[in-house]
Amino acid sequence: MYRVFLDTETTGLSSTVNQILTMAIVIYDGDTIIHEEEFGLRIQRWARIDPVAMTVHKINLVEHNLTALEIGEFCEKIYSILDTYELEKPKPHGHNVQFDIRMVQAIFRRADKPYPFSIYYEDSLILARQLKKKGQIIVDNCQLSTLCTLFGLTAKYHNALEDTQATAKVYFALLTLRGTLI
């Protein structure tokens, strides 16, 4: 069973006026990573840049734009990764993944290209909240960093690839606790 984990770092919180800067995709076949990659989207003229967001992930925009992809190339990159594994409309997995989904959908709309993921998703944040409510995990909050600490994991937070890798590990640990690891 393939699981496609993703995460984005953005210029802000609005999918209407902000944009993705970097996106990571990590694909698992069962419990084995078969693909992991991070790539950037060049700053678009229409995008607003929230200074608070920039202090969170600390991406240098000048350096970023040297290797970042144009919007069409960015979409084609995602199609190519999914096509490599013959994944049609895979379910995205992530932590607070609804945010990432909205950001990715907005980029594909702006590029006038079909959104490549399923409308269904798996969210480790929702799973953690369910387990917390049932008393199966005891944490102050369900932030990724808190859950990583709970499970003895470390990551460089607010880096798309490392957040995606950490999210996958947390997700699998939560499924194990819930007793539904497939």
Image (tube, rainbow, N blue to C red):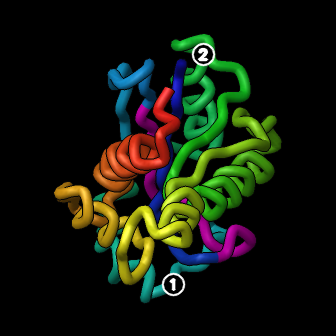
| Along the line of sight, the residue nearer the viewer: 46 or 168 | 168
Q: Is residue 26 above or below residue 106?
A: above
Q: Is residue 16 magenta?
A: yes
Q: Is residue 151 left or right of residue 163?
A: left
Q: Quadrant of the N terminus?
A: top right
Question: Vertical placement of 140 versus 167: above or below?
Answer: below
Residue, disc 2? 83
Residue in the image at 62% along x and 67% along y: 45
Where is residue 157 shown, x and y percent of the image?
29, 65
Q: Identify the image quadrant of residue 130.
A: bottom right
What's drawn in magenta, residue-wise?
A: 14-26
Query: As drawn, is 37 to the left or to the right of 105?
Result: left
The residue at the point 72 percent across, 28 percent down is 89
Label 2 secondary element:
helix
For marks 1 and 2, the one nearer the N-term is: 1
Residue lying furthest bottom: 52
Kind of residue indicated by mark 2:
Asp
